[in-house]
Image (cartoon, helix red, strand yellow):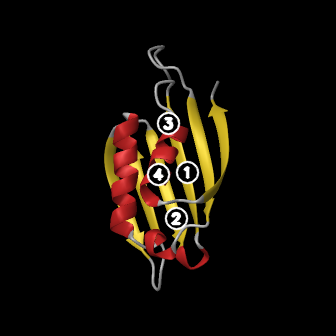
């Protein structure tokens, strides 16, 4: 329930990533650093991170944001990953956040689904 000081509105970006080197998609520390850097550059507040490396390869990383979340799940052996970012309010743009992340990690191919929520 809102007291009128906040409008329930947000932007959601879901990205299917392809054609990315396996070494990058399996480098949990590099990916986490790139996600956090992209989030900070977009001006969102990172409250914490949760990450897990899978055996033999792949990672899942979740950033908890004051504005909502960013997540990444990778399949290095296929050169693929799934990125998801949702930010509440009109101030932040998760698509810019993704593009910053992509530039830092040599993501080569991707398909973006973007939607407005709550408007």
Nearest the viewer among 53 and 8 is 53
Q: Note whether 101 is above or below 76 in the view shown.
A: above
In the rendered view, does 72 fall on the left or right side of 110? left
Residue 52 in view here? yes
Between discs 2 and 4, the one toward the N terminus: 2
In the rendered view, does 34 fall on the left or right side of 19? left
Nearest the viewer among 52 and 14 is 14
Q: Where does residue 113 sit, x and y in percent of width and height? A: 68, 45
Q: Which residue is mark 4?
A: 103
Residue sitting farthest toward the top: 4
Nearest the viewer among 17 and 13 is 17
Whether label 2 touches label 3, CB < 8 Å: no
Q: Where does residue 80 sit, x and y in percent of width and height? A: 59, 68
Q: Which residue is mark 2?
A: 73
Q: Which residue is mark 3?
A: 87
Q: Quadrant of the C terminus?
A: top right
Q: Which residue is mark 1?
A: 84
Between discs 4 and 3, the one toward the N terminus: 3
């Amino acid at each position: 329930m809102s007291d009128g000081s906040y409008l329930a509105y947000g932007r959601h970006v879901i990205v299917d990533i392809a054609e990315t080197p396996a070494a990058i998609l399996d480098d949990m520390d590099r990916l986490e650093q790139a996600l956090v850097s992209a989030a900070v550059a977009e001006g969102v507040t990172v409250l914490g991170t949760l990450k897990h490396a899978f055996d033999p390869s792949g990672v899942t990383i979740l950033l908890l944001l004051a504005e909502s979340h960013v997540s990444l799940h990778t399949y290095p052996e296929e050169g693929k990953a799934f990125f998801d970012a949702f930010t509440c309010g009109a101030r932040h743009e998760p698509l810019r956040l993704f593009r910053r992340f992509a530039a830092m990690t040599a993501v080569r191919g991707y398909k973006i689904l973007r939607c407005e929520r709550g408007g």
